[in-house]
């Protein structure tokens, strides 16, 4: 068994607004089953998020590149990392 704990940014600040924007952008994708593991660090210049695609996604690299190109304008000059997770339990 694996247990994960993920924080959700709250309040009226850059982090919570950005997390909301990214989640809304990813929620618009019908081929994404789940989004988790949002990480944003201005200090490190990085935004990372994990996505679980449905079984129609066969090219993880192209999928991650597409999502990166959509998220990048929200954080110009920062590194965007998309981690593609798969649900192997079904």
Image: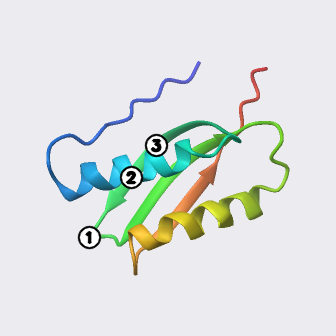
Give the mark nearer the N terminus: 2 vs 3: 2
Q: How far is the residue under mark 2 from the one under mark 3?
A: 15 Å
**Residue tagged 2:** 21
Q: Where is residue 64, by image quadrant?
A: bottom right
Q: CA distance from mark 1 to mark 3?
A: 18 Å
Label 1: element kind: loop
Q: Nearer the viewer, mark 2 or mark 3?
A: 2
Compute the Cα span from label 1 to label 2: 20 Å
In the image, residue 74 sits, relative to residue 35, either above or below, namely below
Task: Choose between 25 and 13: the one closer to the eye.
Answer: 25
Left or right side of 86 for 8: left
Q: Earlier along the polypeptide chain: callout 1 or callout 3?
A: 3
- Residue at 75% x, 22% y: name it: 89
Is the Cβ of the residue at disc 2 closer than 8 Å to that at disc 3? no
Q: Which residue is mark 3?
A: 37
What is the x, y in percent for residue 74? 40, 67
Q: Nearer the viewer, residue 49 or 17?
A: 17
Which residue does the numbered mark 1 point to in the structure image? 43
The 10 Å Cα crowd at callout 2, few under 14, some 14 to 19, many 20 or more, is: some
């Amino acid at each position: 068994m694996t247990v994960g704990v993920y924080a959700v940014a709250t309040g009226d600040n850059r982090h919570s607004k950005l997390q909301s924007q990214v989640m809304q952008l990813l929620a618009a994708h019908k081929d994404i089953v789940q989004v988790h593991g949002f990480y944003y660090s201005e200090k490190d210049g990085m935004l990372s998020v994990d996505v679980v695609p449905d079984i129609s996604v066969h090219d993880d690299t192209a999928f991650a590149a597409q999502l990166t190109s959509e998220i990048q304008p929200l954080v110009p000059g920062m590194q965007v990392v998309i981690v593609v997770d798969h649900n192997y339990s079904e």
